[in-house]
Amino acid sequence: MSSTSPTVAPPRDPGPSPARRAVAVLLLVPVVVAAALWAFAWPGARTAPRDLPLGVAGPAAAVEPIARSLEQKEGAFEVHRYGDEAAARAAIEDRTVYGAVVATPDGPRLLTASAASPVVAGLLREAVAPGAPEGRPVPVTDVVAAPSGDPRGGVLAATALPLTFAGIASGALVTAFKLRRGPAAATLAGAAVLAAVTVTALAHDWLNVLTGSWWGEAGAVALTVFAVGAGTAGLAALAGPAGMALSSALMVLIGNPFSGAASAPELLPEPAGLIGQWLPPGAGSQLLRSQAYFDGNGSGGDVLVLCLWAGLGLAALLFARRRAGEGVPAVA
């Protein structure tokens, strides 16, 4: 009879001591607070127009002095010239410009679109006021007005964070329940549709702050939630908990404050406005604004960004699952 010596398990690594873990927490908390404060406070503290699209309309001789005055404001405005007021109005409704200054024999007249951004509309009033004849205010016409239920745009801006949370939650639950491929995609899509119906019913039918096509608004919400959810699930499938944490930080700490939903992307410091429009919260908030107030005009780029996030997220989810399946030895 042969005897076998018992296998001695190697000693377990106890990991960092409690004291070291406590020090790590104490050091990490201020870093997280500083990062959150930077992400949310920095854009607000540096709000100013940066290449803000603005039209000038009227005869060339009358328009050129106005255009030169605006162009001299250190890159604040990106000036578009139009032959008459009708062309300028069409550009505002197409979301090509935020407003326009119309040259008239009695002085400048301002066209705004508070639905595009109440903050920008107010800023344009301040910028054009010095050009008015002395003692005479600049007449203002709000071409696309914000709804009476949300004149300052606060409710629409507030939707960005809940939509982001809904997308992160759907991606996290798909990951936690270990759904794969078809079931994962179907679950993400179903959650996005249900979230869209809920949000649109509340904002459109109850609060009356969305005034466009009900189905167009619901589609914008669904695509936003789906893009965030697919991106979250895809990063989690590729990198595990680290991917989930990365997605949450990217969408909440970067995507939300850099979205420009409360003002406009062109008012944020560079490159925050640009980064925000390449993330789902920013693209989604602009898409919803276009659907709610501008008949979907100017939304092509936002749809493309959201579709890219959704497609790449689903691809990452499928790729990671395939790799995991290939790594499992076949059972004879």
Image (cartoon, grey):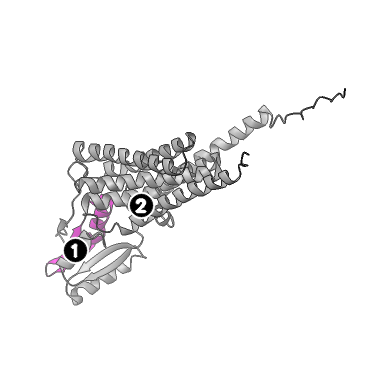
> Mark 2 belongs to which amino acid?
Ala
Position above or below: 44 against 271? above
Residue 126, horizontal then vertical, whole percent: 25, 56
Pick the residue in front: 315 or 291: 315
User: Which labelled disc corresponds to residue 197?
Assistant: none
Image point (35%, 52%), residue name = 283
Would residue 282 be found to the left or right of residue 108 on screen?
right
Q: Which residues are magenta?
A: 102-131
Q: CA distance from mark 2 to mark 1?
A: 23 Å
Image point (69%, 32%), residue name = 15
Position above or below: 132 against 14? below
Secondary element at image label 2: helix
Residue 298, horizontal then vertical, whole percent: 27, 59
Image point (17%, 71%), residue name = 58
- Dot 2, how many residues are within 10 Å of its Cα: few (below 14), some (14-19), or many (20+)? many
Residue 67, horizontal then vertical, whole percent: 26, 70
Res 263 visible: no
Would residue 227 be found to the left or right of residue 133 on screen?
right
Q: Earlier in the sequence, mark 2 or mark 1?
A: 1
Which quarter of the rendered picture does the C terminus lie within? top right
Q: Which residue in the protein does label 1 denote?
A: 90
Pick the residue in front: 140 or 13: 13
> Can you tell which quarter of the image residue 68 is in?
bottom left
